[in-house]
Each structure stands twice: as structure tokens, then as C-alpha cells.
Image (cartoon, rainbow, N blue to C red):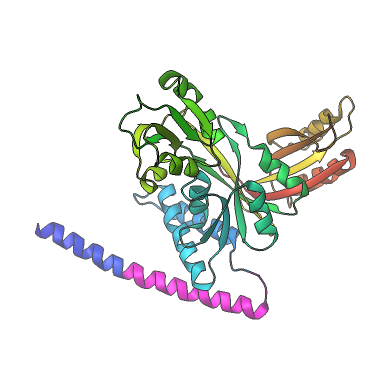
């Protein structure tokens, strides 16, 4: 016991040192903010590329027991708390609280930010455009159900840029006031989770009525008042609405990911690994899309995604959304985009931002 007590005493001493260092770090960060205010160099003090470089340096230099994801989470919270000393970031997300969008926003910006829930994706864009939020977090695609088209459509008329991306693992649970799923007659959830659990529902609750909800959180809230209903949502919703977990990890694929975009007014600076997103329209003639792809191939630019969407009010004409590796400041990417502008009827740069593995 004496040995354990000595180890704990050493841990206490380290905690005291950490507290002093964190407070000292906060004081220095406040000084930087004061200098920026004198120069009026920024409307807010968030510098994403600086945060990214710090995390990269920390994870590269670490040779201890903590995995990269844990170190990332710890320093995200330090960044968030430090920014809150000056002015908390205002982050718009698809609400209400406990949704996967909310969890992704917390993962990216930390608990000390101010999170503002919206009922739809369009509202998030409008809030950022009107400076009611500093950034917005919007879902763009899921590894099972595919693209969230509404998010892509919002970029057509919006001046906002993609500043970053978030990739979150989605684990889905069957939640209810009931203690077993045999008496469940109705299932509520957002259309995306319902689609992601299609096979499981067919095998286990084939006769249950499926009712789409505006979010997994609203579905959980509805179910918290009914005994023969269940919601498909995340584990956090079970705690928030006092629901029983009847089944866990019910998504049809174990590897179920949702990709979220961080939208804002400021362009992201170049880091080690980058991605660039553009949208464009082309002439309705044979070989038009092929010319685009051949140009990028000749410049050895790797595409990570291409998606088409119908043009509003123009039947049978399409917009293409394209993700490619590299930053717009890279000479090959910049030259390629300039050449594409000459081929396309319309081209819009949606942003260059850090690429997540």
C-alpha cells in the first residue's frame, strides 16, 4: 500500500504542475489575443491551421501510452477552453442536442464553445452568413446511405467556404422505455439512421411501423413518452432521455461513418495533407465530363469523390461536385482549376481544407 501511496503522491505533484502550465498557457494565449485586437487583425481568435500544427507536433513527439485520438481530444479541450477565455466560438449544428451533428461539433471544437442548434441545414448556412455563428457543422455523406444532397444544394447560392472536415464513427442503438423489443410497434428516427439499419429492422422488427423524425434526438424525446415505441439513436440520447438500450450497434455495417463539413467565411490555410472541393457545370455534349477528368489525370491530381445533382429550375441539366487531393495554393491544383474554368460553363471553389485520413 505504501508503494501505491507514493505513486499517487507523484501523480498529484504532476497534476499540480499541469495546472500551473495550463494556466500559464492560457495567460500567454490571452496576450496574443490582446496583440491581435490592437492590430485588428482578426474578427475572432480561432486559428485552425495553428491548432492542427500543434496536434501534429504533439502526436509525432509522443512516445507514451496515450493513443493519438486521446491526445487529440485532450488538446481540443485545451484549445476550446483557451478560446473561451477571450470569446467562445459560436458553432451552429443540426439539433437538438445529443444528435450526431452535435457530437461531431463537440469533437471538433470542444465543450467550451457555444453550440447553437438549428432545425435544418439551410438555417446553419444562414446563421454563419449573418455572423450569428462563427462556424457551422453540417453532414455531407454517410458510408452506408451516401450523400446528403441538401447540404450540397446549399453551397450553390451560399458564399461560405468549407474550412475543415470531420469523420465520425456512427454506432446506432435501439432505445425505448420498454425493457424488450418484442412489444415495439413503432420506430422513430431520422431517415438516415433508418436506412443504415434497414437489414437489422427487417430481421428483428419486420412488422414495426417506421416513422421518420427530424433528428435522432427528437425521435428519442418522442419515445420517452411512449411505452410501445423505440428510437434509433446514439448512446448519448439514452442517457439524456432516460431510455433503455434494447440493442446496440444495429447498423447494417460495422464500419459506419458520417462525414461532416465545417463551414465558415475564412479560407483554411495549407497544412501537410489537404483536400479541395469544387462545383461545376458543363455543356450537354458528348465527352464534356471526360475532358474534365482527363485534364486532372494529366496533372496527376487524385479525385476522392465526384457527385452529380440536378440544376434547380433547369430539367436534365446537372451540377457536379468534386473532391480532389491538394490545396488551391498548390501550383498543379491552381493551374488545373484555372484551366477547368475555361472548359466549364460555371465553376465555384468551395474551399481547400485539411484532409482527414
Give how far across and how far down residue 312 sits, in percent: 80, 38
* Residue 215 magenta: no
Residue 1 image-quadrant placement: bottom left
Give how far across and how far down residue 331 sits, in percent: 77, 49
**320 or 33, which lies in front?**
320
Give how far across and how far down residue 197 sits, in percent: 48, 27
Residue 45 image-quadrant placement: bottom right
Residue extending furthest toward the bottom: 38
In this picture, which residue range is highlighted in magenta? 17-43
Establish if 317 lies above or below 161: above
* Residue 41 magenta: yes
* Residue 291 left/right relative to 270: right
Q: Main secondary structure of the magenta part?
A: helix
* Residue 341 left/right relative to 113: right
Q: Is residue 283 visible?
A: yes
Residue in view at x 35 percent, y 52 percent? 64
**159 or 190, which lies in front?**
190
Residue in view at x 35 percent, y 70 percent? 19
Establish if 89 lies above or below 94: below
Residue 293 image-quadrant placement: top right
Give the mark count.
Answer: 0
Amino acid at each position: 500500500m505504501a508503494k501505491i501511496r507514493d505513486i499517487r503522491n507523484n501523480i498529484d505533484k504532476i497534476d499540480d504542475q499541469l495546472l500551473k502550465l495550463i494556466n500559464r498557457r492560457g495567460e500567454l494565449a490571452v496576450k496574443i489575443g490582446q496583440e491581435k485586437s490592437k492590430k485588428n487583425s482578426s474578427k475572432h481568435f480561432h486559428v485552425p491551421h495553428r491548432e492542427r500544427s500543434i496536434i501534429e507536433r504533439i502526436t509525432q513527439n509522443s512516445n507514451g501510452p496515450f493513443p493519438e485520438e486521446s491526445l487529440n481530444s485532450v488538446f481540443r479541450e485545451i484549445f476550446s477552453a483557451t478560446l473561451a477565455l477571450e470569446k467562445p466560438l459560436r458553432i451552429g449544428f443540426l439539433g437538438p442536442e445529443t444528435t450526431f451533428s452535435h457530437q461531431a461539433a463537440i469533437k471538433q471544437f470542444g465543450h467550451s464553445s457555444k453550440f447553437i442548434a438549428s432545425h435544418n441545414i439551410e438555417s446553419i448556412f444562414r446563421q454563419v452568413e449573418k455572423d450569428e455563428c462563427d462556424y457551422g457543422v453540417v453532414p455531407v455523406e454517410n458510408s452506408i446511405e451516401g450523400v446528403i444532397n441538401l447540404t450540397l444544394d446549399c453551397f450553390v447560392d451560399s458564399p461560405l467556404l468549407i474550412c475543415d472536415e470531420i469523420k465520425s464513427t456512427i454506432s446506432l442503438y435501439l432505445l425505448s422505455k420498454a425493457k424488450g423489443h418484442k412489444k415495439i410497434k413503432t420506430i422513430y428516427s431520422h431517415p438516415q439512421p433508418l436506412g443504415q439499419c434497414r437489414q437489422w429492422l427487417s430481421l428483428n422488427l419486420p412488422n414495426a411501423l417506421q416513422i421518420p423524425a427530424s433528428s435522432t434526438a427528437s425521435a428519442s424525446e418522442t419515445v420517452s413518452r411512449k411505452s410501445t415505441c423505440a428510437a434509433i439513436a446514439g448512446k448519448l440520447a439514452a442517457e439524456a432521455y432516460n431510455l433503455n438500450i434494447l440493442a446496440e450497434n444495429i447498423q447494417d455495417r460495422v464500419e459506419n461513418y458520417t462525414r461532416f463539413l465545417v463551414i465558415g467565411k475564412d479560407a483554411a490555410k495549407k497544412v501537410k495533407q489537404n483536400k479541395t472541393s469544387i462545383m461545376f457545370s458543363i455543356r450537354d455534349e458528348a465527352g464534356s465530363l471526360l475532358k474534365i477528368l482527363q485534364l486532372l489525370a494529366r496533372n496527376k491530381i487524385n479525385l476522392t469523390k465526384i457527385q452529380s445533382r440536378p440544376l434547380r429550375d433547369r430539367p436534365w441539366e446537372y451540377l457536379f461536385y468534386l473532391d480532389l487531393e491538394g490545396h488551391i495554393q498548390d501550383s498543379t491544383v491552381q493551374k488545373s482549376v484555372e484551366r477547368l474554368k475555361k472548359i466549364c460553363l460555371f465553376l465555384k471553389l468551395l474551399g481547400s481544407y485539411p484532409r482527414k485520413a
